[in-house]
Image: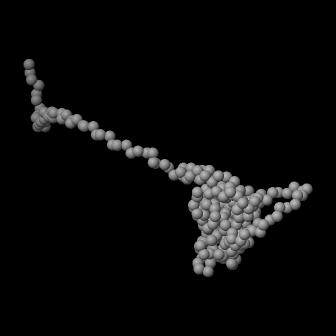
Amino acid sequence: MPALSPTMTEGGISGWKIKEGESFNAGDIILEIETDKAQMDVEAQDDGILVKIYKDAGAKEVPVGATIAVIAEPGDDIASLGIPEPVTKGSAAATEPEPAKQAPAPSSQTTKPVPAPAREKKVTSTGGSKADPAQVFFPSVLGLLHANHISEAEAILKISASGPKGRITKGDVLAYLGVVSGSNIKELTDLIHSRERLDLSNIKIAAPKPKKEEKPKEEKPVVQKPKIVINFDELLTFHPPRRK
């Protein structure tokens, strides 16, 4: 559930404009959300596929940060895509400290290591802009947040966004966790943004070439042809041949 205003803590779903399994483009309206003050549309920030809907139309009092749906990137294999478990807690997950966990006793069975909480990592910034509270996270970003015990509300408040229109990317989360350098993410983002438009800064306007002086055209003398006057009466007059 995106936060459509700074004071919004929960909202309801008026209706979904996209069905499960359907694709959408950036700018398409995905769903309508209603609060006690207004009813607003949620637009897609990028192209994607609506994989799963957790909160159907008519759902009320859904806390901000709770999972209402899962979307995938274009070209993802939905059949083999691991759908994360929905987050039921809202913004409270970002403020309430997690209880300290004791290290498990050694076991003969092989267990999958659990990533450390995000606050134990060396936090770096990508130098991006403030995250858009109305954005819908991609599964790759959402899975990385859940694996590191970061709620969606906490990510919007604490992670700088380098994606278009305030979107948090996977690189932003990795930089926040200290796994990668934030400066590298910023340099790559700046390079991509610099090539989105044609750079005309190195183009100089050439000075106009001086006009060549045109030589005056020589006027040719007018030659009048002699007029030939034809007298038809004279032509029609019979002239007998002269005798020698």
Q: Nearer the viewer, residue 193 or 237?
A: 193
82 lies above or below 60: above
134 lies above or below 185: below
16 lies above or below 105: below
Colour style of the rendered protein structure: one colour
Give the farthest residue toward the top.
244
Relative to 223, 29 lies left or right: right
Q: Residue at x 27, y 37 (%)?
A: 212
224 lies above or below 38: above
Q: Residue at x 58, y 58 (%)?
A: 128
Q: Residue 126, position in %: x, y?
A: 61, 56
Q: Residue at x 66, y 76 (%)?
A: 10
User: Which quadrant would residue 45 be assigned to in this image?
Assistant: bottom right
Q: Nearer the viewer, residue 228 or 92?
A: 92
Q: Evaluate whether residue 153 shows in this view.
A: yes
User: Which quadrant would residue 125 be assigned to in this image?
Assistant: bottom right
Relative to 220, 112 lies left or right: right
Q: Residue at x 60, y 75 (%)?
A: 7
Q: Nearer the viewer, residue 62 or 231?
A: 62
Quadrant assignment for the C terminus: top left
User: Which quadrant would residue 79 be assigned to in this image?
Assistant: bottom right
Q: Residue 172, position in %: x, y?
A: 64, 57
Q: Residue 165, position in %: x, y?
A: 57, 61
Q: Evaluate whether residue 90 shows in this view.
A: no
- How many labels, in total? 0
Give the farthest residue toward the right.
108
